[in-house]
Amino acid sequence: MKKGTNSSASGNDIFFFGEYEHSLDPQRRIAIPKAWRDKGSSTHYFLLPGRFRALQLIPYASFRELLAKARKTSFADASASLALARLGAMAQECHCDSQGRIPIPPALLQYAGLKSQAVIIGAMTTIQIWTPESWQRYRMADESVLDELQKIGEKPDDLTQLLKGQV
């Protein structure tokens, strides 16, 4: 299944839409859809564990914003410090090769349960990588997605509070 687009609203704002099915190659690499690599988008990402055993692929420019907020977190804040360490230990910086592939480390493959097939989802500002079975289970096909969009608009912009409550 291939369907999706990449759109740039302005400047460095890159957005990802759509859904693609891909196979992992024998070297544990997966291809980022060409539509998302065209139109000026970066091929430099950070791969992190995400919610629901999916992987989160964050464009470099967006990850820099997260790092700027993380710098403001006090190393004396025990819960935030632990959360940053856990996230940093699993984070993987990656660049697309000439064919648009990124490697997925064994620990992240295991975390997500990825074996040979994956579904790559445009999650608007990031890319998510799911097993086909997991994506089918969590895919929202009803109006509850609208409730979630409203919650996103109401979330705090304070990284420290988010880390304490959710990581």
Image (cartoon, grey):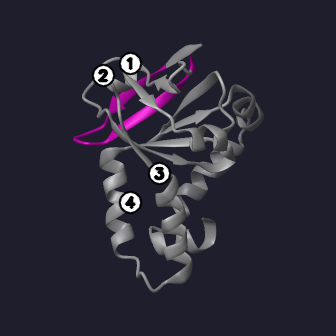
Q: Earlier in the sequence, mark 1 or mark 3?
A: 1
| Distance between mark 2 and mark 1 Cα atoms | 6 Å
Q: Earlier in the sequence, mark 3 or mark 2?
A: 2
Q: Are marks 1 and 3 in contact (CB under 8 Å)?
A: no
| Distance between mark 4 and mark 1 Cα atoms | 26 Å
Residue pointed to by mark 4: 66
Asked which quadrant contains residue 94, the reply is top left
Q: Residue drawn at (66%, 50%), measured in percent from left and top?
A: 147
| Distance between mark 1 and mark 3 Cα atoms | 24 Å
| Distance between mark 4 and mark 2 Cα atoms | 24 Å
Q: Amino acid at mark 3?
A: Ala
| Distance between mark 4 and mark 3 Cα atoms | 13 Å
Residue pointed to by mark 1: 34
Q: Earlier in the sequence, mark 4 or mark 2?
A: 2
Q: Residue drawn at (46%, 59%), measured in percent from left and top?
A: 88
Residue 43, placed above or below residue 33: below
Q: Amino acid at mark 4?
A: Leu
Q: Amino acid at mark 1?
A: Lys
Q: Nearer the viewer, mark 4 or mark 3?
A: 3
Residue pointed to by mark 2: 38
Q: Are marks 2 and 1 in contact (CB under 8 Å)?
A: yes
Residue pointed to by mark 3: 91
| Distance between mark 3 and mark 2 Cα atoms | 25 Å
The magenta stretch spans which residues? 4-23
Q: Nearer the viewer, mark 3 or mark 2?
A: 3
Q: Is residue 10 magenta?
A: yes
